[in-house]
Image (cartoon, rainbow, N blue to C red):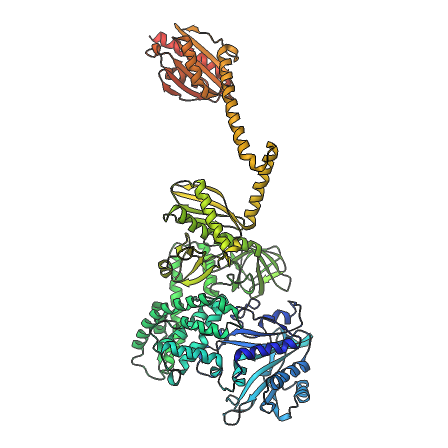
Amino acid sequence: MTSTNDIRRSFLDYFEREGHARVPSAPLVPHNDPTLMFVNAGMVPFKNVFTGLEHRDYSTATSSQKCVRAGGKHNDLDNVGYTARHHTFFEMLGNFSFGDYFKDRAIELSWGLVTKEWGIDPKRLLVTVFHEDEQAVELWKKIAGLSDDRIIRIATSDNFWTMGDDGPCGPCSEIFYDHGDHIPGGPPGSPDEDGDRFIEIWNLVFMQYVQAGGKIVGDLPKQSIDTGMGLERISALLQGKHDNYDTDTFQALIDESGVLSGASTGGDNQASHRIIADHLRASGFLVADGVLPANEGRGYVLRRIMRRAMRHAHLLGSKDPLMHRMVPALVSEMGQAHPELIRAQSLIEATLLQEETRFRKTLANGLRLLDEATAEMGAGDTLPGATAFKLYDTYGFPYDLTEDALRGQSIAVDRAGFDAAMAEQKAAARAAWKGSGAKASDDIWFDIAEEVGSTEFTGYTATESDGQVVALVKDGARVEKAEAGDDVVILTNQTPFYGESGGQMGDAGLISDDKGLHAVVADTSKPLGRLHAHQAKVESGAIAVGDTVHLAIDVERRDAIRANHSATHLVHAALRNTLGDHVTQKGSLVAPDRFRFDFSHPSALTPEEIARVEADVNAQIRHNEPVVTRLMTPDDAIAAGAMALFGEKYGDEVRVLSMGRSAQANYSVELCGGTHVNALGDIAIFKIVSESAVSSGVRRIEALTGEAARQWLIQRDEKLREAASVLKAAPDEVPARLSALVEERKRLERELAEAKKALALGGGGGGAPAGPEQVAGVNFIGQVLDGLEPKALRGAIDEAKARVESGVVALVAVNYGRASVAVGVTDDLTGTHSAVDLVKAAVEALGGKGGGGRPDMAQGGGPDGDKGADALAAVKGALEAAKEAA
């Protein structure tokens, strides 16, 4: 038997031998088409190549493209498991020509592969063509030798492909396989075409014309080819099966489901096992491509897929979570062709386990209440929409799951009633919001969110993508259009731009289109916590609601922010390891050029503690461990040891970031919705540049990473070399030389102070003679000493008192325009004269206030150094007044 992996490989090998570039599958999340929820066809990643917006270094290509059809207008979810060929996830084999070859070569290559390379009996094959495409008819006759009765002309749009009302279009030609008259069904175009006898295996699209407004307006300048062949369908055919679920890949997964659940894989259980196998593939690939379960957008579709499979595991009687245990089988079957499954295996397993553990509680409650609500119902009845909404709103039981659960009983659900109940709840929530005192300026954001829903953030895995403009806000009001020169807030249905939150600054970048729009985004905010508002200036062109635009973030800026954000997590862990578990985050700012981190701690960090934090963080960076993201409930995350970040608002689910390694487990585990590096080595280097107090019990670290840290270190090294040059020493000798210079300066300052004091007291200081004079019957020495340090006054007073033996000494030291004054009174006079009273008189004369000390020694100062003589006169006046009072 030819395996599915062999068939995929042989297809790609065949076209590579025929000169086609082998192109890896693009991720399931499309970044070039905002109207698509997921990539749903092989040509989607090449859309801009076909339209001429993008140019690549090859003109022909082949790929096996991952596709999902489970949301939006391309939704096969409800049929999966109950038919032979419907899947949520599938692979589309294709070959493409971008203005290179056209119909003849495309037909030649396809016919050669299926009949010669794979050996399919040509007598079993027939083709369809668009009824006006006589060129294709003649080529099929010439190249494949098909007779007229095996070339079926189709007049409907089934055989005419368009990319939309505007753009490339052209006729199609499909290859069908006849499984034989023992299977019911007729050829395509017949009344019995819906039977399973004739199965389409390949569709060849001939991009031939240009369409505008839904009408053909001319020929394409470069005619192109786009083909699509479902790997699952062709594998069934080449493996001799009529049902895709009987192929090797599906049978391996179905067998594993049977073993792990303990339920037989046939009979009434068949559909459940098929749903589990199909949905496991879709879930695994979506998680590997960066989609995680959520309550809206792509994450909601993933959750629906997961929960549908998990419900069928419940129906099979599985008592414990099942799907996460099937991931090794999925990786074994498909990991070689898709290594992203191997890289993401642990994340896929953890996400499935978390979702199924949580869902089992919801399922048990919901099914019990659903059984009660339908106890009196029978086939053909309808469950009231209000009941379905209560299950959803109160017990978390999704609408689609209610539909699926009642499908086997042939009970319908009143969708209109459900929608009405949902609308009523929204109206009540709006009224409650308006009555809560929220800012009136937020009303516009509430309107937008209510009308268009939340912005889907694609920036965890992408740095650019297309988006559809859903709203424009200018000068606080909604507008339909903005033009060059306008400052405008742009909102799109999806964006890679991160909106400022959790301390991380919003992204900057560019919004553009192919019509000349060039809008520079300076910042991105996050109104209501669920809209991403791009603060932009339209520099050229125009933008209108409904436009498709290309959004590209400033990647270098984002990379710097990501490095800084991941570093804050490592710093938090390092601080707790160094200082103790009392350390918790009290705030942060994550910018592209730096970050700051506030934390609880009663005292300044010592140099040794700062060094240890730096060493620990840089050690984790050097280990270069990958950063792992999981989705959990807040309670489960915290119970698992995750640290909640300050200022973050948490909903029903949180992203849990694990990074680094320690002896026990991860070095850091925190709840965080920000963007982070893929591996810690991306941070490059970490350097603390300051540590300071913010408030009582709160400290702040400011730090740098990456290139900013390197530049800071370079500048510090340059300063060191400059200092070394001035000192005429080697850089390594600078500390010793500076220490010696400081000691030398201290010695010289002491000697200078002594010399100044000696000079001043000896009468050479420019003041009065050093000898005493008689004032109010006491010996008095008073001098103004220029340049004497204030701290030298006390010693000078003591020396003067010793020399006068009995009396009062007043000395004024003048430095840089300010004056310091000290007054000393010998012990025999402290009963009649207080140094404190005398110094206050001097301080007042100097323009100051106060002054104090002891009766024998007091000191003060004032701002007016020119009033030194007045200060001495004030002391004399106080002595005279004391004598008169006595």
Q: Position of residue 498 (x, y in %)?
A: 51, 58
Of residue 594 and residue 484, the one placed in the foreground of this image is 594
Q: Position of residue 545 (x, y in %)?
A: 55, 64
Quadrant where the image shows the C terminus: top left
Q: Position of residue 791 (x, y in %)?
A: 45, 21
Q: State the residue at coordinates (44%, 42%).
A: 608
Q: Does 388 sit above or below residue 553?
A: below
Question: What is the residue that sits farthest to the bottom in this orientation?
Answer: 181
Q: Does 282 sit above or below residue 577?
A: below
Image-based side of 127 in relation to 747, left or right: right
Image-based side of 512 in relation to 261, left or right: right
Question: What is the residue that sits farthest to the right in this orientation?
Answer: 221
Q: Position of residue 837 (x, y in %)?
A: 37, 16
Q: Does 86 sit above or below residue 538?
A: below
| The image quarter in which residue 795 lies | top left
Of residue 742 and residue 31, the one placed in the foreground of this image is 742
Q: Is residue 235 visible?
A: yes
Of residue 532 and residue 658, the one placed in the foreground of this image is 658
Q: Does 689 sit above or below residue 266?
A: above
Q: Is residue 416 visible?
A: no
Image-based side of 659 in relation to 883, left or right: right
User: In this figure, what is the number of numbered marks?
Assistant: 0
